Image (cartoon, coloured by chain):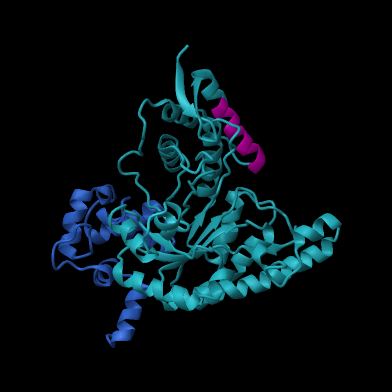
Chain colours: A cyan, B blue
Amino acid sequence: MQKYFTRMGDGSGIYLDAETIRHDLEEGTADAASRGKIPELTEEERDYLYEIVVSPVNVTSIIRGKETVTSSDSGAFKINYQADISMDRATAIQVHEKVLSADSLDLGNIDYSYKSVKAILHDEAKVMENVQLNTIMPVLYGAMPNLGLYTKPDGPVDNWSELLPLGKIDEARAAQEEAIEYAVKDMVYVAAGMYRAGADGINFDTCGASGDADVMAALLAIEIIKKKYPSLGIEMGMAGEFILGMHGKLDYKGTRVAGLYPHRQVELAEKAGVSIFGPAINTNSNKSFPWNLARAVTFVKACSEASGIPVHANVGMGVGATPMSPVPPVDAVSRAAKSLIEIGKADGL
Amino acid sequence: MSGIRTAGDLVLRMQLARGLKIEQAKEYVASKLGVTPFELGDCSMMREIRQSLDLGYPMPDPGAAKGIEAKFNIVKVLGIKINSVENFKRKTGLQ
């Protein structure tokens, strides 16, 4: 029986037969549909995914004419801090524009949180000013709401992750509500500074990393920023496919924030004034690439169809069907990108 | 889309500025450049167009608009405001 090379969710190579690949595609889409209460992929769409998975080429690509654009999170420190090349961030952005052909990039501090940036905004703004003089593509400023940084001993608020196991539910909720107020102030302050520095937009990255309060803080900050600076673009990228209910009772404009999957998350993002929404579908490293692919495409397709704003699917290590590996295999990444655009209807990555 | 090699930066600007989905953003940019949305991804054709409109492109010729200079021209072609261009005008008394 012929077997095809593909991968596991951790990036390791495996050989699977046609029957197993088709089975995993069916199981992956069924899992997403069940969790999100959204439609499964059709048989025709699963057949197309199958063709993408078993294609004999190493790196695949999208159909000509279907090209989409890219945005980034922490884009300006992939070359320097992560690839370990001695280069400042402003130069790295020019390399992304002139050599790597990025459609946009975000400048961010290595401590990628608004709370951390607040204290060094005056220096970060000067970098943005120089970047804006020397680049053509849109350059955003990016950081995370990162609500956990507001808890003791690093911050002023009691730690809800310590309170919850003690059964102190009300105290945990109050602590999160207090942290939201601090975070909103910091995010609005940084956005104002970056607007003055000429930024094309603000990227709220990894929203929900600390649960529903983390998302709530981002939404409230975005609402204020859009009122103050209507022309400033806003990108909102998520931490995962499901918003954890660390608080559980937070409502944004009549919708409970906890428990939402991407197709409902984007509704709140639109209401807040977001320009570009980035769903993040978690990769299960114990499942095969075909399983993760069908699952991610199912979630992203539902999100794209529900959205009135562009959807940039997260396709980094451990999300968007991309294997959970520091160096994701390009055969898998290119297949994920093609599938998320052609079947998932993503407006960008 | 390959950024300034093609029209990726312009399409993304329309997503950020107007919240346009990919097809709408491409149609808008294509109409402003006088090409089809399909042609926006052709680096050969787009290089000629970007050269003629001085919108900035990789491996630029001497004298080509760079950085903020190219963005001044993008503002005119796309009919949008760019924050850094507005800042430049304000700081230099052009506004």
Residue A345: image location, x then y, percent: 45, 44
* Residue at 34% in and 73% down: A130
Of the pair A181 and A342, the residue shown nearer to us: A181
Provide residue A325's location: percent of width, then percent of height.
51, 41
Quadrant of res B87: bottom left
- Secondary structure mostly seen in magenta is helix
Task: Report the residue at 47% width, 57% height from top.
Answer: A73
The answer to whether B61 appears left or right of A123 in the picture is: left
Tell which of B24 and A348 is nearer to you: A348
Residue A300: give x, y in percent of width and height: 52, 45
Numbered circles on residues, count: 0
What's the residue at 55%, 74% (across, down)? A118
Position in image of residue B6 (x %, y %):
26, 53
Residue B81 visible in the displayed image: no
Q: What stretch is highlighted in magenta?
A: A24-37
Residue A26 is a magenta residue:
yes
Q: In this view, does B85 lie to the left or right of A200?
A: left
Report the residue that reaches farthest toward the left.
B62
Q: Is residue A17 visible?
A: yes
The relative height of residue A75 versus residue A24 in the rendered view (above or below) is below
